[in-house]
Amino acid sequence: MIIRKATSKDSQEIAFCMLLAMEDIVYTFIGENTTEKALAFLESLIIQKNNQYSYENCWVIESDNKVIAAANIYNGADLKQLRKPVAALLKTRFNQKLTCEDETQFGEYYIDCIGVSSSYQGKGVGSKILSFLIDEYVHKKKETLGLLVDKENPNAKKLYLKLGFKIVGEKRFVGKAMEHLQIH
């Protein structure tokens, strides 16, 4: 297994991983519970530059020349700018208005989502990419990493706390109660 920066060629595989991590959120964004349309929405953003879901903001884990996990991360200070193309696509393709709270802010690199292919879940792949991101952003670049965890996902919260994240607050995001965690 290798961890590397994503390329535009990884867009389809990244979309599958991301949808596993944020299925309900994407369905809320597009106003439909259609996997095919949700994947197409994500892929059309991932393949482009300069938006929050762009391949430019992704790391992947590759095994046997196949992407098995993806992490989407960007500078929280850039959220409003990175979100504009997402809102535009939602409006033109789905006639939906992006109405969600800001999940991040200035002062942190935000882990938007981490998705692990179904056949690799429970095998430490998520922990591996998280540990990599902590090393890359916190130890090497001296940045703060932040993320939101659903209050109804105690296993994920337990993992984040074990890796050194601390609870710094609470937020609502797309109708869900979340805890905001950071590590620096």
Image: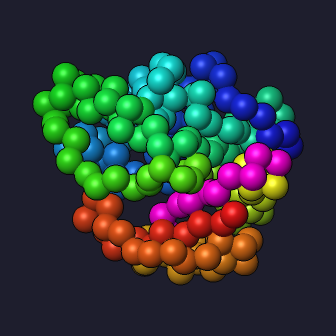
Residue 146: give x, y in percent of width and height: 56, 59
Q: Is residue 170 left or right of residue 156?
A: left
Q: Nearer the viewer, residue 83 or 120?
A: 83
- Residue 47 visible? The answer is yes
Does 144 lie within the magenta span?
yes
Query: What sort of colour scheme is used for the picture?
Result: rainbow
Residue 152: give x, y in percent of width and height: 43, 78
Picture quadrant where residue 45 is located? top left
- Residue at 66% of width from left, 77% of height from top? 161
State the quadrant of the N terminus.
top right
Q: Nearer the viewer, residue 110 or 159?
A: 110
- Residue at 75% of width from left, 52% of height from top? 142
Does 69 lie within the magenta span?
no
Q: Is residue 84 left or right of residue 63?
A: left
Residue 145: give x, y in percent of width and height: 62, 57
Specify start and end residues of the magenta stretch as a single range.
140-149
Picture quadrant where residue 122 is located? bottom right
Residue 36 higher or lower than 27, as above or below: above
Residue 7: give x, y in percent of width and height: 66, 22
- Residue 159 visible? The answer is no
- Residue at 28% of width from left, 55% of height from top? 101
